[in-house]
Amino acid sequence: MNDISKQRLLTRLGCSFNDQSLFDLALTHRSCGAKNNERLEFLGDSILGFVIGEALYQKFPDAKEGQLSRLRSQLVKGETLAEIAREFELGDCLNLGEGEMKSGGFRRASILADAVEAIIGAVYMDQGMEAAKGRILNWYQPRLEGLVLADNPKDPKTELQEFLQARRAPLPEYDVISVAGDAHAQQFTVVCRTSLLKEPTQAQASSRRAAEKLAAAAALKALQG
């Protein structure tokens, strides 16, 4: 990964490192050799579980242990981590061995998920717990805000689409109306338009996809309220 690609990824992640070698290591798959991201992944997995558990504890003060455990499992599972990696286009910057590169390892969900956990571990090693917690909560903001205490909560965009299809209404449309902030901390403002609402709903987040989810959740709330 060249320096330009590295800086672009750091900007998307909202990260900076005092020790750049930790970031390089976090992106290095075991197919590259003995010096890889597995130890950082182990560390990041533990930190992620704690931070998300604490966030859920604060968000749902009346939830039972089983409900909190199900929600945490949903948020820290490999599929969710791979989604986050794709939002940041992390796969393009992975350090992979020749075999993994040829087999499309940069698209493999398990490799992407492991790299996200490794980056969390690297941030912790470089700057401590508060920095790691801040990054996790920033990346998870739309997912945490859209959570409900259902056994199988769906993505707000999927739920909105199903709601509209059940009523034979056109699918929603999403548009970015503004991008503000410095390159390392951009904020996307998105509107969601549906024929069943007179006014579009609007939301802001650190990525387009995250803002779309928040706008969809707001539209659902308006339609169901």
Image (cartoon, helix red, strand yellow):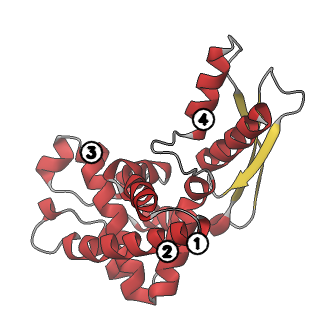
Above or below residue 79? Residue 5 is below
- Dot 1: element: helix
Query: Is residue 18 among what the camera can see?
Result: no
Asked if marks 2 and 1 touch (Cβ < 8 Å), the reply is: yes
Q: CA distance from mark 4 to mark 3?
A: 24 Å
Residue type, mark 4 in image:
Lys
Residue type, mark 2 in image:
Glu
Q: Nearer the viewer, mark 4 or mark 3?
A: 4
Image point (60%, 60%), residue name: 141
Which residue is under mark 1? 58
Q: For residue 1, which quarter of the picture?
A: bottom left
Classed neighbour count for the residue bearing mark 2: other residues with Cα under 10 Å, few (<14), some (14–19), many (≥20): few
Residue type, mark 1 in image:
Gln
Which residue is under mark 4? 157
Image point (45%, 45%), residue name: 151
Q: For residue 190, which quarter of the picture?
A: top right
Sequence-first tag of 2 and 4: 2
Which residue is under mark 3? 108
Sequence-first tag of 4 and 3: 3
Q: Nearer the viewer, residue 14 or 57?
A: 57
Q: CA distance from mark 1 to mark 3?
A: 33 Å
Asked if marks 1 and 3 touch (Cβ < 8 Å), the reply is: no
Classed neighbour count for the residue bearing mark 3: other residues with Cα under 10 Å, few (<14), some (14–19), many (≥20): few
State the image coordinates of residue 26 (x, y, percent, origin top left). Answer: 31, 71
Image point (15%, 64%), residue name: 30
Q: Nearer the viewer, mark 2 or mark 4?
A: 2
Sequence-first tag of 4 and 1: 1
Which residue is under mark 2? 54
Above or below residue 204? Residue 47 is below
